[in-house]
Structures are given as structure tokens and as C-alpha cells.
Image (cartoon, grey):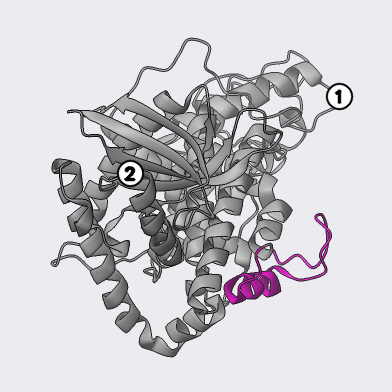
């Protein structure tokens, strides 16, 4: 997770930038955010399922991290620590939103970006699957969604995700399994050309795979 | 035996039956075969990163810039380098600082709450630590200043209430400057330590723009008419002499003494 180089141009690692920020460098924290901004945004967006909530949650989280950088002990990647702050801020917002339910606007489906599923051979199928994945993710309970987003979408290990979510690894595994199962049900009816090549759905009768 | 695997891309549909997935139901949750579990995981890993929209990026970086400016002002005014504060925390003395900051926060909140409920509090009661402050980095605009501040006042009030409850004596102390380690994002109160220096100069400044006691000061951005770029400002909300009205002063961050750097002044109804 540690970046040594890359846009914006700065040779310092994330850890070094964080230390510089704590020491008073006025630009160091912004460089870290600039470096990982799309990843933070993706996590916030997929955790909340709502662009407005994601933007609010992300701003709240990054300001909090800016102020509290001194509490970062450096025993994990900077991005892991920041993701923890972001995910917690987003989950807090979801909890608060749950306490004041609102009616979504018609057609308020969120487009999470273009080309989410890389499948150049069947753009229509990929598009359909992308839309369904967006919807399906939003329908998962928040804790399962956060675990699935961190482990499956963002590629964190179960242990790292557990650290981010401040829960045992077994809990993350369980949430991921339950979340994936619900996604499988939800996505079962979607046309997806890649499914046929390697899914291996188990038959209940013979364990046959395709 | 019925073909319970999906039939591939030829017909375009993998099928929808639960049997096809090897589904079983345990409690409220479905369970699928390891192959399906792996497929879903693989599918999710192929999702692209949606790029952060430009307007979100602009907003977040503005907020961070404003926060950075406040922190720089603190270091300049107090002469206490930020790394020294961090070193103190790392040495385990954080609880001492926490007590101090918590006390300052509590004082600010108590007085701030008093101010909110007692708009007529005399200006002589103003203390640097008594003014609730935040650094939202909000883009205040001349044409929307009234509505923006009106909305903000409600937010500030709920923030003051939440913060007061966070700092109740029976609760673990969580200060903005010395965070709890288990969940830093829960610390949502304004950066008291970072704002401490700004408090002093702005308090002095407020005395020169208004005789009242401010209910809140927020650091943000403002583009004055005929100005090409936004500037960092302090938006000061003061209960007006007229009942249920609030005076809003927009002053430059360098506002000190008689040099108020007043950018705008409007009077709005107190949103209550």
C-alpha cells in the first residue's frame, strides 16, 4: 500500500509524508490525499452507496485524519489508517441516516463510474452486470458491504480489513461470505458472458460445474 | 438430471434458480458454494475505481487548505511546532494535554451554549477559549451568504450539543487534538488545538466588528465582489441586538485589532 512515487510528484513515501505533516509541513497531507484520492473516493462511495453521503463522509474523515495524524503510530500503512477513518466516518453517516430515513429521488441510481466491469467482448452484458452490482452492493447491510468493498473490491487482506473495521478477522470473513452469497443471489439472473467460462456454480445434486 | 449449471453465454442467461447456485439457507443468510463465492469475489475485484469527481476534489482540498492555514497560524502565534505536540503525545503525556484541551473545550462549549441561549451576554465575558470555532472550508458566496450561514447555524448548534455530550464527565474524554485510538473518525469536534491561536486574534477582532458575543466562528473561503479568487476568511455569527436576528461578519484571517479586514456584513433571522 505504501507509495514511493507517483502523481503528484513527490519522492517521499506515505509514511514520510505523514511524519512531515505531523512536523508541520503544510502540504504533506494534501499530497497523500492527492495520491490516493480515487481510492478513498471509491471506498467512500461504495460504502455509503450515495455520492452526497460519500462526499460528506470523506471530507469529515480527511479533516479528522488531518487533525489527528499525531495518533498514527506508523505500525500500519498510511492508507490502511486513512481507510479506517474513511470507512468509520461513512458507517457513522449511514447509522445516522438510518435514524432519519429518507425517500430516494426517482432515478437516483448511482453511476459509480464508467467501465466498472472490464469486459470488452460484451459491452451490453458488462453494462448490465455493472448496474446490477451497483444496486446489489447498495442493498447489502452496511457492515457486510464495507467488508466486501475492502476485501474484494479494494483488495485488502482479511487481516487488513479487520484492522480497518476494528473487528476480528473471522468477523470479516463471515461478513464477506454472507455478503457474497447475497450478491450471488442478486446477480444470478444477470446476463454475464464471463460467467460461463469459469464460474463453476455447484449443482446441488452432483456438484457439477460449468 | 436437470442441468443445474448455467448454460453459458449462448442464450445470454445463466439462469436464476437458487438451486443453480448451490444455495442453502442458514438463518436469514443464503450460503453458496465455494466456487460461486470465488466468482463473486473475482467479479468484484474487476471493478474499476470510479474517479473522484472534480467538484468533490475541489471541496475537499479547499477544506484541507483552510485547516492547514489555521494550523500554520497556530504555530506562528504560539511558537509551538506541531511536531512538538506530537512528540508529547507519543511520550504518553497526552492525557495531561487532553485534560487541558478538554477543559478548554468544555469551557468553550459551556460558554458557547450560554451564548446560544443568552444572546444578550455582555461582550466583556468574551474569552478566547469561549468562542466555538470550526474550519469547515466551506465556499461562502456573496449571493448565498444568508442561506449558507443560516444552514450552518443549525449545524453548529447540533455540533455544540453533540460535543457537549461527548465531553460529559462520565464519558471517556475525546478531544480533537488528542484523539482516541480506536476510532479517530468519531472525533468530529473542531480542532481546538489547531484553532487556539486563531481564537485569540479573532476574539480580539470580533470586539472591533461587533459589541456582541459570537455564537460561532467558522473558517472557510469567500470570494468578495470583484475579487478574482477566493480568500480564506472567518465567518463570525453574532446574535444581533434585534430579537431573533443574527449579525454575520465575514473577515479576513489576518483580522487583528482595528484591522478588521471586513469583507461582508449581513443580518439574518436566527433559524432557531
State the residue at coordinates (32%, 42%). B156
Quadrant holding the C terminus of chain A: top right
Residue on which disc 1 sits: A121
- Residue B139's image quarter? top right
* Left or right relative to A64: residue B14: right
The answer to if B36 sits in the magenta stretch is no
Is residue A112 positioned above or below B80 on the image? above
Q: Secondary structure at mark 1?
A: loop
* Res. B8 in view: no
Give me the C-alpha separation between circle 2 and circle 1: 68 Å
Q: Give the dominant element type of the magenta stretch: helix, strand or loop.
A: loop
State the residue at coordinates (37%, 53%). B133
- Highlighted range, magenta: A1-26
Question: Residue A120 location, x and y as percent?
Answer: 85, 27
In the foreground, B7 or B30: B30
Question: Residue B236 location, x and y as percent?
Answer: 39, 43
Residue on which disc 2 sits: B210
Amino acid at each position: 500500500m505504501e507509495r514511493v512515487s507517483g502523481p503528484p510528484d513527490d519522492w517521499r513515501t506515505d509514511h514520510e509524508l505523514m511524519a512531515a505533516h505531523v512536523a508541520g509541513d503544510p502540504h504533506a497531507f494534501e499530497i497523500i490525499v492527492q495520491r490516493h484520492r480515487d481510492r478513498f473516493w471509491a471506498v467512500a462511495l461504495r460504502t455509503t452507496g450515495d455520492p452526497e453521503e460519500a462526499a460528506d463522509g470523506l471530507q469529515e474523515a480527511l479533516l479528522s485524519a488531518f487533525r489527528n495524524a499525531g495518533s498514527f503510530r506508523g505500525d500500519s500503512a498510511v492508507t490502511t489508517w486513512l481507510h479506517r477513518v474513511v470507512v468509520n466516518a461513512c458507517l457513522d453517516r449511514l447509522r445516522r441516516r438510518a435514524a432519519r430515513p429518507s425517500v430516494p429521488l426517482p432515478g437516483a441510481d448511482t453511476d459509480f463510474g464508467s467501465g466498472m466491469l472490464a469486459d470488452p467482448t460484451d459491452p451490453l452484458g458488462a453494462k448490465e452486470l455493472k448496474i446490477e452490482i451497483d444496486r446489489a452492493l447498495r442493498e447489502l447491510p452496511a457492515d457486510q458491504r464495507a467488508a466486501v468493498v475492502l476485501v474484494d473490491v479494494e483488495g485488502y487482506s482479511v487481516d487488513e480489513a479487520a484492522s480497518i473495521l476494528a473487528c476480528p478477522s473471522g468477523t470479516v470473513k463471515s461478513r464477506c461470505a454472507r455478503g457474497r452469497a447475497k450478491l450471488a443471489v442478486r446477480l444470478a439472473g444477470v446476463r454475464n458472458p464471463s460467467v460461463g467460462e469459469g464460474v463453476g456454480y455447484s449443482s446441488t445434486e452432483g456438484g457439477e460445474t460449468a | 438430471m436437470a442441468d443445474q449449471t448455467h448454460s453459458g453465454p449462448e442464450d445470454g442467461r445463466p439462469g436464476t434458480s437458487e438451486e443453480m447456485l448451490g444455495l442453502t439457507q442458514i438463518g436469514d443468510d443464503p450460503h453458496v458454494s465455494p466456487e460461486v463465492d470465488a466468482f463473486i469475489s473475482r467479479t468484484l475485484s474487476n471493478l474499476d475505481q470510479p474517479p473522484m469527481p472534480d467538484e468533490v476534489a475541489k471541496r475537499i482540498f479547499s477544506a484541507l487548505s483552510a485547516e492547514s492555514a489555521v494550523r500554520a497560524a497556530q504555530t506562528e502565534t504560539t511558537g509551538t511546532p506541531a511536531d512538538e505536540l506530537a512528540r508529547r503525545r507519543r511520550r504518553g503525556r497526552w492525557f495531561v494535554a487532553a485534560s487541558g484541551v478538554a477543559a478548554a473545550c468544555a469551557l468553550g462549549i459551556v460558554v458557547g451554549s450560554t451564548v446560544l441561549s443568552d444572546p444578550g451576554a455582555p461582550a466583556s465575558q468574551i474569552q478566547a477559549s469561549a468562542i466555538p470555532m470550526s474550519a469547515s472550508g466551506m465556499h461562502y458566496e456573496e449571493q448565498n451568504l444568508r442561506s449558507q450561514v443560516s444552514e450552518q447555524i443549525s449545524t453548529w448548534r447540533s455540533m455544540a450539543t453533540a460535543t457537549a455530550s461527548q465531553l460529559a464527565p462520565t464519558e471517556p474524554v475525546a478531544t480533537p487534538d488528542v484523539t482516541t485510538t480506536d476510532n479517530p473518525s468519531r472525533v468530529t469536534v473542531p480542532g481546538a488545538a489547531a484553532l487556539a491561536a486563531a481564537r485569540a486574534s479573532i476574539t480580539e477582532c470580533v470586539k472591533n466588528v461587533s459589541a456582541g458575543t459570537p455564537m460561532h466562528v467558522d473558517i472557510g473561503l469567500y470570494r468578495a465582489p470583484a475579487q478574482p479568487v477566493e480568500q480564506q476568511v472567518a465567518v463570525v455569527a453574532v446574535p444581533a441586538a434585534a430579537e431573533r436576528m443574527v449579525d454575520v461578519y465575514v473577515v479576513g484571517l489576518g483580522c487583528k485589532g482595528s484591522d478588521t479586514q471586513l469583507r461582508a456584513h449581513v443580518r439574518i433571522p436566527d433559524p432557531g
